[in-house]
Image: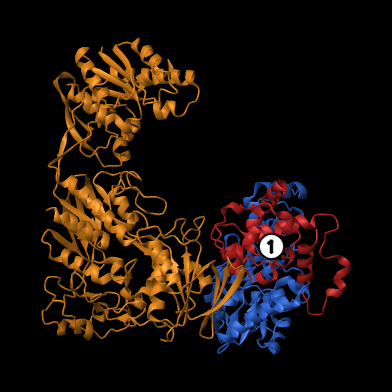
Amino acid sequence: MQRIGVFVCWCGSNIAATVDVEAVSQALAKEPGVVFSTNYQYMCSQTGQDMIQSKIHEYNLSAVVICSCSPRMHEATFRRTCEKAGLNPYMVEIANIREQCSWIHKDRAEATEKAVILGRAAIAKVQLNAPLTAGTSPVTKRALVIGGGIAGIQTALDIADAGFEVDIVEKEPTIGGKMTQIDKTFPTLDCAACILTPKMVDCAQNEKITIYAYSEVEAVSGFVGSFRVKIRRKARYVKEDVCTGCGLCTEKCPQKKVPNAFNLGLDTRRAIYIPFAQAVPKVATIDADYCTMLRTGKCGVCSKVCEAGAIDYKQKDEVIEREYGAIVAATGYNPISLAQFDEFAYSQSPDVVSSLEFERLMNAAGPTGGTLLRPSDGTHPKTIVFVQCVGSRCDGAEKGKPYCSKICCMYTAKHAMLCREKYPDTDVYVFYIDVRTPGKNFDEFYRRAVEEYGVHYIKGMVGKVVPENGKLKVRASDLLDGRQLHIDADMVVLAAAIEPDKSARPLATMLTASMDTNDFFTEAHPKLRPVESPTAGIFLSGACQGPKDIPETVAQAGAAASKVIGLLSKDQLTCNPCVAAPNEMMCNGCSSCEKVCPYGAITYVDKEFRGPNRTTLIRRVAQVNPAVCQGCGACTVACPSGAMDLKGFSNRQIMAEVDAICL
Amino acid sequence: MMKFSYFPGCTLKTRGAALDRCGRAAAEALGFALEELPEWQCCGAVYPNARDEIATRLSSVRALMAARDAGTELVTLCSACHHVIKRVNGDIRRDEDIRAKVNNYLKPEAPYAGEAEALHYLEVLRDRVGFDAVKQKVAAPLAGMKIGAYYGCLLLRPSKELAFDDPENPSVMEDLIRALGAEPVVYAMRNECCGGYVTIENPDYAKKQAQRIVDNAKALGAECLITACPLCMYNLRANTDGSLPVYYFTELLAKALGVDGEEAKQA
Amino acid sequence: MIDMMEQITRIAGVNPRKCMRCGKCSGACPAYDEMEYHPHQFVSMVENGRIDELMRSKGIYTCLSCFACVERCPRSVEPAKLIEAVRCAVERQQGMDRLRPEAVPGLLNPDLPQQAITSAFRKYRK
């Protein structure tokens, strides 16, 4: 029999207003094993904790029951309190009489009765508690960042700055991500490349950082502190360590008709290419879909002109394996396909472009050398219509996304402003549903577009775009003026909704990290743990967690890095001792537990057992790796023979709680 | 041979006879049979958007039940008939209340629960026959013709229910035009309203609508238009300047297959 | 008027509260200039219970039922269904038919398809 102390908390008036705390502590004092019972205003306060510790000594308590708020709030607090008084921390049980009682009941008598019952259940359980000791596991002091955009770059730089090794895996031939394609950044209008490329160079030159560009994560195993990751290094057909990045091959390659993905197909490049001048690593890549040599075996021009001898047509994909203590997902976003919104005639006219395409058309390194020209005929557009919220804020899953894409209001204001600045004779219309510009200096920026640059902001939406005789006939509503507008535009720019990169979903499966219905990674807590996945050791950086602009992305990237640094600076991790453990004598080797385990913590071994008459038997029995087990309990339910049990939540303990409530 | 139940609808026996006649001739040439439903009634003419309208849904249900009992899919040529019949079928499948009331009213031997499949003739060509097979049967390719497909509203919208094609950038008629050896002209007004029945009350308003469609098609280089709807046909002919000839898609189909007879003179 | 509003949304089977005031319906509507209350206003006025004003408006007869607003509405509000529900509410009253059989012969012309008359009859009469 335990010597149990019961401590009932008022939580100010949160509990005491609805529950008669004095009655509860008196009723629980009569329970078997309870040698002390009291109540107090704030049990979590220092005074409250001091009282618990002194009563443990005074009454020689072997177990403690706290009737208070949810264990998610203060279980760790009270465990520490009791541990300092010499008790095993797992000899503490919490009865939640706030969230599960006082907050949801109005009737004081009923609530008091329920609080007593919940306390009684906790007492019944703690009677069967056994001291548990948490094990430890080592930490591999190296981090993996998946995705080499601004989010991944910032996270990697911050981790490296703290002295830890960090690898970046990027699926494109260069790091840099979407920000490399952007012309200017709001609200300061500084050039995106000018602020990004120094960071890319820093990554390349930092000896703590290894960049695996043109590579993809293929498999992840292990757990927090010791992940094992397989990385596929796709064949570039160019030796990365030999290529000098001189670019001669990209000028001599005879295959000129390859759509240039960096410019979103607005111009062409060669089959061997370096995406842009400041690429990191600055190494050529052969596009196997277009290379004549790889497709027909005849050509070899790039190999002939390469003085460094870097071309290797026989190169194969290579899979490498690395160990990491922490993994950061920074897989970013893409604009959605506009094919489903052809009321705007995106697929019918080259002069209807997405906002990202517009960035390229304004960019000095873009297909028009920074002069805004219509893709159809290379003339200056005089009337430009911007359409906001294309595919954002849509109801239902058939078309578009239910969320606000967050960045479009600001980049459209930027586009409109830049148009008016560079080409003052241009008429610029922006059709908006709401202008959403919360952020430092954001609304001022938008107002400047209206007030100083004379951009026509119209509350309403475009309903139809009709290409005709070189014009785009735009039909739209002007809700404030109460009229339908018919504008003959030269260009229409669509602010397409953004969505997580397609690689995020399979990656989440590999990482056992959770996602929402829109394929954004879910954070461990929406307010208090925004850069951590609920899966231990997995962290989130940038737009893979939700739509974000650059300043927010960089802030979150730094936050993710600090969480990684916190983890990597530990030599050992304390494991959760509440893990599954099989009773080998009862295990029948059926594998049911192994099949349901979401963490791969269960394996089977053949083990020798003593049989009757001094014989030995070989039996196949389950083994749990306590470092991998997360204590979810799925195996205990699946086990047909009842051999699997969860420490701290054993079947006997749960049944004792149920009995205490029901009997 | 593939067999389908066929629902012509009111106009295809009179003003829209060419749509029907060429459609039947082409079906024969392409190797599928259209078996006209015996004693068919009006489709209902317009789809009743009001959810509490039951009587106006019944005639469509009768046609659908007849097709179910014949064990065939129900094919229509007229866009309006197709629109009404397909959406009523959807109501019966989705809306328990409508299904119960319709069956209560009709008291059929076997209650109707949406078992029949309503298909437009163009869907038959695309999904049952296949445009490659159509192409192989073409005897007189319409080489050099630049044709604008006019879809209008009823074939495409609401796409959630019609599930006919991309409602904003459809391609079924363009694919047909290509199969017939002609060149499709894609123009944005092809899914805008022709003016519909408003021509009765307010022909000026219908004229504005129809002319905008013709102007856009012409600007993009169309030399003629094709449609699947007799009312669209009327508006595009009677309520425009007549600068673009308008044909039923079956007329050009039959012509290309070499089975058109009298339509050859027109086209 | 609250009862009337409930009746309209029930007949239409749509929820005007889903409207986010984007105005895409009114941007898409080919009959905009023929209506004194435009599609987005229709939605808002139904939500605010201004049904009698809508029942008196001629826009309920000039809606082409082309479903452009239904197709393009990002919120599945489907204004055309509300417009038709109001028209039904008018025509279901005694003596409120828009088109009477006696008027039909005067409307016919040799090229007009039957479909036009039957459609109009269905739209304008209960």
| Residue B7: quarter of image | bottom right
Measuring from the top left, give residue B237's x and y in whole percent: 71, 82
Q: Is B246 positioned to the left or the right of A48 in the image?
A: right
Host chain of mark 1: B
Q: Is residue A634 above or below residue A483?
A: above
Measuring from the top left, give residue A630's x and y in whole percent: 27, 37
Q: Nearer the viewer, residue B92 or A324?
A: A324
Q: Amino acid at mark 1?
A: Val
Classify the position of the N terminus of chain A by image quarter. top left
Kind of element beneath mark 1 = helix
Rendered residue at 29%/29% (across/down): A75
Which residue is identified by label 1? B84
Measuring from the top left, give residue B151's x and y in whole percent: 62, 74
Residue A173 visible in the snapshot: no
The colour chain B appears in is: blue
| Residue A166: quarter of image | bottom left
Rendered residue at 17%/54% (across/down): A159
Measuring from the top left, give residue A636's x and y in whole percent: 32, 31
Q: Residue furthest front?
A: A452
Q: Nearer the viewer, residue A395 or A231?
A: A395
The colour chain A appears in is: orange
Rendered residue at 76%/70% (across/down): C115
The colour chain C appears in is: red
**Numbered label tally:** 1
Q: Nearer the viewer, residue A113 or A19?
A: A19
| Residue B87: quarter of image | bottom right
Q: Nearer the viewer, residue B66 or A426?
A: A426
